[in-house]
Amino acid sequence: MRSSNPVFSRRGFSRDNGSAGFNAAPQAGGPAVGTQANPYAQQGGGNPYAQNPYAQPDLQQGAPPQAPATTGRMTMDDVVMRSAMTLGTVAVGAVLAWALLPVTSTSFGLAIGSALIAFVLAMVQSFKRKASPALILGYAAFEGVFLGVISEMYNSRWSGAPFQAVLGTMAVSGATLLIYKAGWIRVTARYARIGMAIAIAFIVVMAVNLLLVAFGVAEDGGLRSMGPLGAIVGILAIVLGAFFLTLDFKQIEDGIAYGAPREESWLAAFGLTMSIVWIYVEMLRLAAIFSGND
């Protein structure tokens, strides 16, 4: 089952014939790392690990290897640094948009345009064979403009909602990481399949709801209303965002363990940014609903 993020599902962390690194069974007769063949193994001769510097004796003991400190291999420091750069770009774009763009219909149109450009850049990157820092940072900048404008709009009507959304996003992201690292959540193939089925169903339902609202069939936002039903849908969306994060954490962990190239830390940062933006937007709506200042 592939990750929620297109950057992970295209390449890098998902090279095992579609199983995306979630405890996939190795091919018959092939070597295994835990329950998954190393997607970065260099094939050579009769021993598939003959040229692989990461083939250590513990490969047969059921645990992913610890990737050695080899030049050119992705490390957690690389992921943290790239994530800080990407999220920092989102934050700077949001602050500048908030400070420089007044709440008008023109700024709302600019926000929509920025969101569309960010979407296009994200799709271009997802179909590229290699990470492009320029595309990723460009996506982050335009996403930041979009978030800054809509955050200012929400704040003008529901004072303090963006601040609450930031705190909520940090809380959900931090709690998800702690729960994942504590081993309370095991990202298995079944876990990924069930979660992705729910996520796809949610997105389809939301798309239908948007169409119904646009054509006047559903009133007051339909399932995305600012009432109790909208709050329930928002909470479900935040849970899905946390689910996406667990997939990201797992694939980053596997990428480091299996010796992913260093440049793929940009893809890790890109994927984490998309998941965190998802959570923030849903938190913003939820904060507005609970503020009760309609």
Image (cartoon, grey):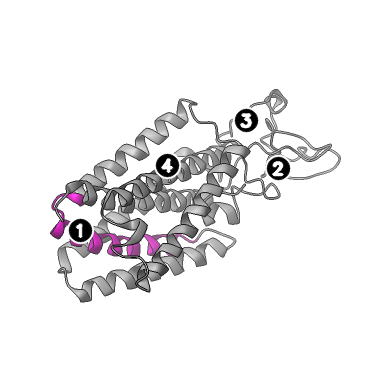
Is residue 6 part of the magenta span, yes or no? no
Residue 41 is labelled as 2
Residue 242 is labelled as 4
Badge 3 marks a residue whose secondary structure is loop
**Mark 3 or mark 1, earlier in chain:** 3
Which residue type carries mark 3? Pro
Q: Is residue 124 visible?
A: yes
Is residue 133 part of the magenta span, yes or no? yes
| Foreground residue among 108 and 29 | 108
**Mark 2 or mark 3, earlier in chain:** 2
Q: How dense is the environment of label 1, judged by Cα within 10 Å: few (below 14), some, or many (20 and up)?
A: some
**Mark 4 or mark 3, earlier in chain:** 3
Q: Is residue 262 visible?
A: no
Badge 2 marks a residue whose secondary structure is loop
Residue 65 is labelled as 3
| Foreground residue among 224 and 97 | 224
Instruction: Provide the residue span drawn in magenta.
Output: 132-161
Left or right placement of residue 156 versus residue 27 in this view: left
